[in-house]
Amino acid sequence: QVQLVESGGGLVQAGGSLRLSCAAPGRTSAPGRTGTAYAMHWFRQAPGKEREFVAGIRPSGGGVYYADSVKGRFSISRDNFKNTVYLQMNSLKPEDTAVYYCAAASGAFIVTSVGGMDYWGKGTLVTVSS
């Protein structure tokens, strides 16, 4: 069982920045180390809408992929020795308001579907005011 704990959400004005963190205590996914490798992802769910893919990163950190709606504004990264994944969000817009979820999929590849995740965090709320 992998526990994922998100942090860093909050209220920010349009055009501002936030950095979300997702910690997976007790797990490792660094190349060459024991343990199952996971591709890590961020999803979000706005009120009244379905959960949607935001960004993903491969276990080694060597490959990333973004939804078109955040490309050029958001950046995903990971520190495998700290078992932590980050989502740097810049130039935030009111339409970015949502609960942001960290999710893990076992294996080497980024998966963009909600059903493809093996583990989920409980989410952190990001509110962008206009």
Image (cartoon, rainbow, N blue to C red):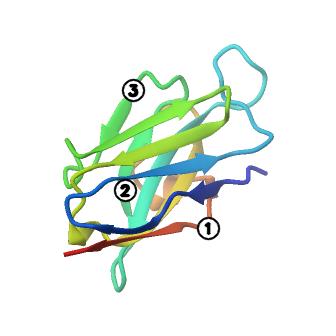
Mark 1 surroundings: few (<14), some (14-19) or many (≥20) residues within 10 A? few
Question: Please, what secondary structure does the residue beneath circle 1 have?
Answer: loop
Q: Above or below — where is 97 with respect to 82?
A: below
Q: Image quadrant of residue 15?
A: bottom left
The kind of residue on which mark 1 rests is Lys
Label whose residue precedes the other's in the sequence (1 or 2): 2
How far apart, in angstroms, are the residues tagged by discs 3 and 1? 25 Å
> With 123 as the anchor, is 83 left or right in this view?
right
In-front residue for pair 74/67: 74
As measured in the structure, the alpha-carbon distance from the residue carrying label 2 to the one carrying label 3 is 16 Å
From the viewer's side, name the closer residue of 124 and 56.
Answer: 124
> In the rendering, at what x and y percent does residue 14 appear?
21, 66
Under mark 3, the amino acid is Gly
**Which is closer to the viewer, label 3 or label 1?**
1
Q: Is residue 110 visible?
A: no
Location of mark 1 (residue)? 122
Which residue is located at x 33 percent, y 38 percent?
65
Mark 3 vs mark 1: which is more N-terminal? 3
Secondary element at image label 3: loop
Mark number displayed over residue 68 = none
Where is 20 relative to 121, above or below? above
Q: Classify 116 as above or below 57.
A: below
* Label 2 packing within 10 angstroms: few (<14), some (14-19), many (20+): many
Kindly indicate the quadrant of the structure image that contains residue 111.
Answer: top left
Q: Position of residue 2 (x, y in %)?
A: 74, 49
Amino acid type shown at disc 2 = Phe
Tell whether 80 sits left or right of 46.
right
Q: Which mark is residue 53?
A: 2
Residue 63 numbered tag:
3
